[in-house]
Image (cartoon, coloured by chain):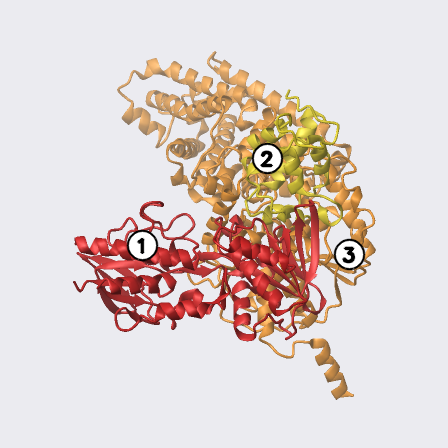
Chain colours: A orange, B red, C yellow
Amino acid sequence: MKYHPFVIPFSIGLAFVMLYIVGMWAYWIIRLSRREQKIVWKRLFSFRTIAAIWESMMEGLFHRKIFRKHALLGYMHMSLAFGWFMLIVLGNFESRLYPHSNINPPYYPIFFEFFRHDLSPLREYEEIFTFLMDFFLLLVISGVMLAFFKRIKSRILGMRRTTKHIRIDRIALTSLWFIFPLRILAESVTAGLYNTGHFFTNFLGQNVIYNLPLDQLYYPAWWAYSIALGLFFVTLPFSRYMHIPSEILLIFLRKYGVKEKEHHSTFTKIELNACSRCGICIDTCQLSTNLNISNTQPAYFLRDLRYSQPNEQLRETCMMCMRCVEACPVGIEVVKIRENERKEHQLYSENSYNYLNGYSYPKAKVAFFAGCMGHLTPSVIKSTLKLFEAAGVDYTFIDKDGSICCGRPLQLGGQAIAAKQLIDKNNALIHATGAELLVTTCPICAREFRHNYHLNIPVLHHSQYLLELVNSNRLKLKKTDLNVAYHDPCELSRGLSITEEPRELLSKTVNLVESGKQIGKNSLCCGGSLGATNISAEQRRTIAVATVNQITQADTNILATACPLCKKTFCSAQDTVAIQDIAEILANNLANIKNQNPTKKSAEREVITA
Amino acid sequence: MGKDVAIIGGGVAGLEAANQLATLGYNVTVFERNAQPGGHAAKWDRLFPNQRHSHEVIDSLKSHLNGNPAIMLSTAISTISRNGQKFKLDAKGRAFEADAILIATGFELFPAERKEEYGYGIYENVITSAELEEMFAKNGKPTMKSGETPKKIAFIHCVGSRDEKVNKPYCSKVCCVTAVKQAIEVKDSIPNAEVFNLYMDLRMFGPGYEDLYKEAQQKGVTFIRGRLSEASELDEGRLLIKTEDTLSSCPLKMSVDMVVLMVGMSPAIGTSELIAGLGLHPNKDGFVDIADQHLYPTNTTAEGVFVAGACVGPNNITDSVNAARSAAIEIHQYLSKK
Amino acid sequence: MVNFGFAPLEIKIHDLDKSNLQLSSWIAERDETFTQCIACGCCTATCTAGKFTKFSFRELCHSIRRGEIAKAIAESEKCMLCGKCTLVCPRNVNTRNIVKLIRKANQKFKV
């Protein structure tokens, strides 16, 4: 006997979901751009595929990134995904090992205990299979219980807030939660009647529910289990659980080098579907932790974009600090998607900045660019230039008489048409200086120069250049006993992956004291962000104060940063901790050392040797 | 009677209240954390609106300090607590007792380096109004770091006042008239100097203040309605300042030899910690909160604790003297009933 | 759709009985800091665009508050959204947001 009507809900669901997934995968792959298809094809038979398989396993089954965030939360995700996966795999093996059942209908392994009460033909494998099946069922049910518990008290699992789900997600979630208790019921009833289980289901069937009318429960239990499965499968494509098949495709495509473009694409669609709305982004977002704005995070933004259009509030309420991108277990490029979504709303025309014609920067060898914000922190400029002079750098302060904005602030707001005009203009002007190197104290400019300009010369943030000068002995520093904490600016750490250079520089001059996990790429935002225009000054202050408190300790003398905007934001928000740019700390250090001018020194040495 | 009154702060308000209370027969002790009495006024050269020498006022206030009222200099009170009917004061291990407390801790000058874009502490010829007073007291005129006499000077109003960016949203009241006074003094001491005052509003509220404004205009001081956005350094220590000439809706820049920042009044450091022991809290601007704006301006909500002077908010000397006398009467009434 | 009735002629006198203040209130409803300006001119003084062309954010907002709408909207396109003005404003006016609102008014109501 290999059929019973109760398998119909499951079978319909399974057929539907498989067709849907295969259909969507095919549709997405066809809709990728020609260029993307080409690189996928070219790289299909390469090491990248193995890497993608490995990553799919590590992330899809074991949820490595979530484990890193919180062990129990990771366990919850792992137990559900890995446990269920193993149940399916083992069930298949089990049914195939059974004599005369090499070719089975798809539902057969799932409901194996219903069809085969006598497992003795499995011979020596009977014990192993029944044990493992019970073991993984127990693993999954522990995950379900944790998931249920998370809805009530999420803090235990390291989450302050969980995602507020829409109806389809709740239906899918509920059916998912029902699947495993119902499976346990069906298998325990069967085990109670026919001794088909092992330590778990046999125990339940024979010692816990044995005085229930098991033979009357037998069919309803299997029916219920099948219906729960069927319902889950039917709702899967329209709910958050579409992330399961989408994420796998995403991992592969990403490994082949497909990424977000300057506008929404098919890849965006895959990313949108790959978001499981796990809600990790909500707790990561400082708008939520500091300001209690907990309804505009990527989980909600991507969801609304997937189903229709996010409203303006949802689209604009984001500092674009990229903390969520770092934290996302799926690695969705949500800030890029948000930027592209903002691009749908251009506010400028194509000749907004005609008035810039005729301006030029002076000729330079090493060009120093302070940027707009930099002009509001003259101490940083003065210190940087002092250091350059001490190191004998042949520099020119090219925007001394005024900068043209780098375009990044417009870009963050999605104003691509306007940004392009500034980028083109600035690009030409910087090019015309003839500089061999461009150094800026502003990470916002630095990132824009590197990512969106075509300058053909190295662009360095001053932390990098100063470190070069120190390492090549052109600048000499002395260690002092100041306790300094360092704040990573968003655009520098997450935007440009520059986290070590400022630390190395500081370690050479002061006691670098770091506290907490939120450093480097996980650093907090100062709150001054140009990415959001709809948060108030008071809200920015709240974020800034919280950030300063997190980074500094009672004995911190100085909070160092490497961005004029961060410095201004912190200085404006509080006056308890002194805020200095790394250049200022270095320049103060320099003031204590004599004979700093190495060009002079080497000249002297030449005289002596002569 | 022989009841003890402790006055925290030996500036204008503290000294004046001490005189009044001693006259009324109380044992008065003034605790001053600095080595000299007189507060900020003692460091000022001349006072608005009549260019009177500040030391005349301070000397008069100090002349009564002859045992009662007594003054303890270089004595910073660290905590005050209520002890039954009395107050216990602690100054680095030394304990004092009093039947009533007068808080007269005054103010702190706004630390101008917090407005980094104005270049104080970065450019050598950016100074504060207080430093200009020192120059007047020393040389009778301002001098640049190089020793030269400046020919072009800009006064920047509202530095650390009416500025939410440094959490000082309030008006410091006295800087407008001080800037006008100092502008006149610069004109008087360096006749061919060009003087510019960059203001947002000129709040000339006191008797004689408007006359001072007119005098400055007559003496050729240029008033520009716009707030400084940023200063930068030109060659040879000269400074480039940027503002908007709001009356003509046009950005304006000019080079000057010296920039004087009219620093506002900030709450005195340590006062909010001091009053916390008495169950009092600072108001939103950080000054001591008073019991009633109109009827009890020198009372606090804590029984037996009174306030006078700039610790409740920016004040001029006249206001501080008035508040000190008012506080003396309130303290007298309070102690008489006890 | 709100009809702002943009005046094509330059205003010679502010007749507050007739001034069209609808855009002014439309912006103020969406950003309360629009009304908080004390006309200090810091925004204009620090402005990156103001270095190259006559551009005053303060004046622009003021024109809107006096009903000179068309002129203000056209002017607003000069802004680079760099954010310097936001950093210097002593009244915490959310300048970048206001520029965006003015630009949006241009689009939404097609001047």
- Give the number of marks: 3
Could you tell me if residue A571 is visible in this image?
A: no
Q: Which residue is mark 2?
A: A316
Across and down, in percent, residue C12 comes to: 72, 33
Subunit of label 1: B
Q: Mark 3: which secondary structure?
A: loop
Q: Which mark is residue A489?
A: none
Subunit of label 2: A
Across and down, in percent, residue B48 comes to: 50, 61
For label 1, count other residues whose C-alpha is less than 10 Å away and answer few (under 14), some (14-19) or many (20+): many
How far, Cα to Cα, is label 1 from label 2?
55 Å
Give amino acid for label 2: Glu
Give amino acid for label 3: Ile
Asked if labels 2 and 3 touch by Cβ distance under 8 angstroms, the answer is: no
Q: Which residue is mark 1?
A: B326
For label 3, count other residues whose C-alpha is less than 10 Å away and answer few (under 14), some (14-19) or many (20+): few
Q: Is residue B175 above or below residue C76?
A: below
Q: Quadrant of residue A131?
A: top left
Q: Is residue B305 above or below residue A327?
A: below
Q: Are marks 1 and 2 on the same chain?
A: no
Q: Is residue A135 left or right of residue A603?
A: left
Choose between B238 and A17: the one closer to the eye.
Answer: B238
Q: Mark 1: which secondary structure?
A: helix
If the image is split into quadrants, where does the C terminus of chain B sit?
A: bottom left
If the image is split into quadrants, where does the N terminus of chain B sit?
A: bottom left
Viewer-side label of 1, 2? 1
Q: Which residue is mark 3?
A: A457
Choose between A57 and A401: the one closer to the eye.
Answer: A401
Question: Residue drawn at (51%, 31%), measured in percent from left and top?
Answer: A89
